[in-house]
Image (cartoon, rainbow, N blue to C red):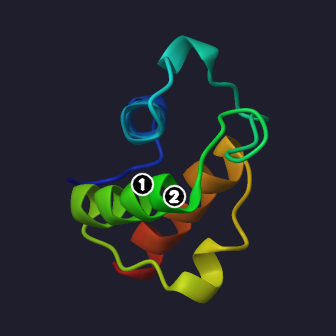
């Protein structure tokens, strides 16, 4: 998938978050904490990282992924990784 930083791309990231964390996309906001608001556990975060890697053809190093805590940070991180791979 080509990521161009559009609202559609951000929506796709949110859809993946919803799917892999078992929450409704309507309940997700940019400020939602993955752990505190969306109740992500370790396994859910690993699944999400793998899904994002596959969907956007990027690599997410563990040491960087553990620093991401909100939905906005996930979107920004994915956009930055895609840009870095271009």
Residue at screen point 32% across, 67% down: 53
Residue 50 picture quarter: bottom left
Q: In this view, does 59 lie to the left or right of 70?
A: left
**Nearer to the camera, 52 or 3:** 52
Res 62 label:
none
Residue at screen point 59% across, 53% down: 41
Q: How far apart are marks 2 and 1 (CA)?
A: 5 Å
Q: Residue furthest top?
A: 26
**Element on which disc 2 rests:** helix
Q: Residue 14 appears at what percent x and percent y?
A: 48, 34
Instruction: Relative to 83, say whether 32 is above or below.
Output: above
Identify the residue position indicated by label 2 in the image: 45
Instruction: Relative to 66, say whether 33 is above or below.
Output: above
Identify the residue position indicated by label 1 in the image: 48
**Element on which disc 1 rests:** helix
User: Are the residues flagged by discs 2 and 1 in contact, CB closer than 8 Å?
Assistant: yes
Count residues near mark 2 (Cα–Cα under 10 Å), then give few for <14, some for 14-19, many for 20+: some
Residue 22 picture quarter: top left
Q: Residue 8 appears at what percent x and percent y?
A: 39, 30
* Count of numbered badges drawn on the protein: 2
Q: Is residue 73 left or right of residue 49?
A: right
Count residues near mark 1 (Cα–Cα under 10 Å), then give few for <14, some for 14-19, many for 20+: many
Residue at screen point 34% across, 53% down: 3
Instruction: Relative to 76, say whether 46 is above or below.
Output: below
Q: Is residue 54 left or right of residue 15?
A: left
Q: What is the quadrant of the C terminus in the image? A: bottom left
């Amino acid at each position: 998938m080509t990521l161009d930083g559009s609202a559609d791309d951000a929506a796709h990231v949110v859809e993946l978050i919803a799917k892999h964390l078992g929450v409704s996309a309507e309940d997700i906001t940019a400020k939602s904490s993955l752990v505190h608001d969306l109740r992500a556990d370790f396994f859910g975060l690993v699944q999400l990282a793998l899904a994002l890697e596959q969907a956007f053809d990027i690599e997410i190093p563990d040491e960087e992924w553990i620093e991401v805590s909100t939905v906005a940070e996930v979107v920004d991180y994915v956009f930055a990784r895609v840009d870095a791979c271009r």
